[in-house]
Amino acid sequence: MHFAFSDDQLAFRDAVRDFLVRECPPSVVRSAWNGEPSQLWPQLADMGVVGLTVPEAMGGLGMDDLDLVLIMEETGRAGLPEPLVETTAVVAPLLAAIGGTVAAEHLPGIADGSTIAVMTFGAEYAPWADRAGLVVRAAADTVELLSPDAYALVPQANVDAARPLFALDPRVLDGGPVLASGPAAAALAGAARDRGALAVAAQLCGLAARMLDITVEYVKERKQFGVPIGSYQAVKHHLANVELKLAYARPVVYRAAWSRHAGDPLASVHCSMAKVYASEAASVAVKACLQCHGAIAYTLEHDLHLFMKRVWALLPAYGDARWHQSRVATHVLG
Amino acid sequence: MMDLRWTPAEDQFRAEARAWLEANAPREPLPHGDTFEGFPVNRAWERRLFEAGWAVVSWPREYGGREASLWEWLIFEEEYYRIGLPQRVAQNGIFLLAPSIFEFGTQEQRDEILPRMAGVDDIWCQGWSEPNAGSDLAGIRSTGVRDDAAGGWRLHGQKTWTTRGAFATKLFGLFRTDPAADRHRGLSYLLVDLDQDGVDVRPVDKLDGDAGFAEVFFDGAFAPDSAVLGGVDRGWDVAMATTGSERGLTLRSPGRFMAAAARLVDLHHRIGAPTHDEQGARDAVVEAWMDAEAYQLNTLQTVTRLAQGATMGPESSVNKVFWSEMDIRLNEAALRLLGSRAPLVEGAPDAVDHGAWMSSFMFALAGPIYAGTNEIQRNVIAERVLGLPRK
Ligand SMILES: Cc1cc2nc3c(=O)[nH]c(=O)nc-3n(C[C@H](O)[C@H](O)[C@H](O)COP(=O)(O)OP(=O)(O)OC[C@H]3O[C@@H](n4cnc5c(N)ncnc54)[C@H](O)[C@@H]3O)c2cc1C
């Protein structure tokens, strides 16, 4: 038994963190709010982040969820306004699993950053679909590739404008090449959803940690009644609660990554648990951090709202905590 | 003797209020009052309310009221929210300042201020918080400097988080008029005209994107002696009375939450709960509904005490914590029903009720901050209701 990341994994994480601290400050997230994408995709591709899950033969790093999970946490911490969950965690491994000409045709473009890919599940909304060169759709009984002229997008304004959501307009949807059907499709879609839930769970942990950092700094500086507000027990307890939630969310998230990596038969249940725990940590963090700031964070000028709203946007992504908990319940209780 | 029924006269009052509202309330939902487009529309509606004598039902007739009892005021509030009308743009005047004007104002102040407030000729905002004085309200640094020649006070300094400051014509604020005095003693409660030189109002966007906040800068603006409420250097006591209203009865009447709970129940009827969450979401809806009911019962008890001549004490802090936290739970229950549609906002074709639930959730999150934070309220409850030792 050894529950820790390798030096290489940590070094990669640190490199990505340094990059995002430099290149993805809150001003970049704000620009995305105004409809200006971050321009970071090519650099993330150069670093190997975008193609992390693409097989080496097709230009990627050939890694999996265990290497990705810490990177995802960092992108959450930065509030990165880019479809990395969708492209790297969800679609690339799906295409790699299918293999053959589909993989050969699309994966090199994903790895080199020229193709953004997203996946839609049933009636769920797809983030950043407007920038996607490739849309995969999990329908009732199939997994399909949608050709660009076969669908139209309906923008669905949402609380996090840096992560635009879209519905597929059903009227123009005539399907595309079927990648899999029947049980094979269900397995592919299920695994894709698990990876999405896991990646989002990692991002939620990163978001919670970022909000906590911002708030810890603030309550040390801000004085009321002549003392730092962080010296009040009520404030301390709020922030200690966030730390507690995170301390018990991260191992759950990392275990899910390991289970996927190791092919554990319970990997799906573990991904569900990850989404449940990370959602709780992030939700507690939102409230505690806003509350400890007082009115100053209840503005658009302050950065906290960028992270709060990302949390609200991610809570339902790839199944909300309730849906995932019902899967755990089925496992535990039958 | 206990009797939890409305009297025939109260039922009659309700019927009258309902009939008028049903005949006169705008057919289209009013736009949000804290936006540049929405504010004038709301103001026009509240003007109509005034002209028909429904703006301030519990006030004396001479100021535009109908001398209704507190009970009838509660009934009116229920009917007002029941029909789907939003919180009033006049609220900080009629619900926060007015009770203090009745208590501390001179005859001239009442006559001059109250009718214009009720008629929304003046929109009042609350100028208390400053960048360095939030929870620590007595840390106020804005000053009123004596100007004997002009017979009043010259104001300097900055107020912040002033709700609806961008739309208001008047501000009730605390200013330090005796710099030498103890920090709670040297404050005066001034009623300031915002439409004058030396006042600069800068809108600040709130979390939800509305221009609902403002910063108000004073640089030599003037407040005459007649604008002091409750006596020079006596502002702290007046302010504490105002917070009693803010936290206690008037700002958040039960009708508002009963209506919100009814809308939540209606949402459940319309869209149901996600199939994987039927029982849990059902529980959350019912809990919110019961909370609103409990809040009403607590208020009925309070009003009974007030009607018997009691005054609001530190128990207003109990009230404030309850409604602010209830409001969050209620909105969270709605988001739970909405599932993947929860994050959608105004403009999204799939947004249920135009994204109103996400907006009201965001507004609810401010509840534990404004009107005195819930941490401060819990300290008050512990120290002044329970008598625990102060640090
Ligand atoms: C939507 C909204 C509308 C508002 N409208 C108005 C308005 O119209 N007019 C106006 O004047 N103000 C208004 N305010 C400001 C409001 O009154 C203040 O935000 C509030 O008093 C808290 O002050 P602060 O924001 O400076 O936070 P701070 O006082 O800095 O508090 C930050 C955190 O520290 C905690 N804290 C501080 N002191 C203690 C203590 N002794 N013990 C334990 N915890 C403590 C607080 O509880 C909070 O969690 C509004 C605020 C909001 C959010």
Image: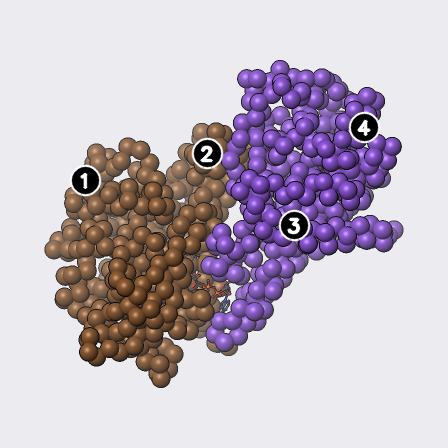
Q: Give the percent coordinates (x, y) of residue A241.
A: 62, 59
In the figure, what tint was chain A given? purple
Q: CA distance from mark 1 to mark 2?
A: 37 Å
Task: Provide the residue designation for mark 1.
Answer: B16
Task: Provide the residue designation for mark 2.
Answer: B347
Q: CA distance from mark 2 to mark 4?
A: 38 Å
In the figure, what tint was chain B given? brown
Amino acid tagged 3? Cys
* Whether residue A259 is visible: no
- Residue A24 is labelled as 3
Left or right of A30 on screen, residue A199: right
Disc 2 secondary structure class: loop
Residue beneath the point at 34% across and 49% down: B254
Circles 1 and 2, Cβ within 8 Å, touching? The answer is no
Of tags 1 and 2, the one toward the viewer is: 2
Q: Chain of mark 1?
A: B
Disc 3 secondary structure class: loop
Of tags 1 and 3, the one toward the viewer is: 3
In the image, residue A240 sits, relative to residue A300, either above or below, namely below
Circles 1 and 3, Cβ within 8 Å, touching? The answer is no
* Whether residue A302 is visible: yes
Disc 1 secondary structure class: helix
Determine which quarter of the picture holds residue A242. bottom right
Task: Provide the residue designation for mark 4.
Answer: A97
In the image, residue A106 sits, relative to residue B82, either above or below, namely above
Decide: few, some or many residues near mark 4? Use Cα within 10 Å; few <14, some 14-19, many ≥20: few
Of tags 2 and 4, the one toward the viewer is: 2
Q: Are marks 1 and 2 on the same chain?
A: yes
Q: Are marks 4 and 3 on the same chain?
A: yes
Amino acid tagged 4? Ala
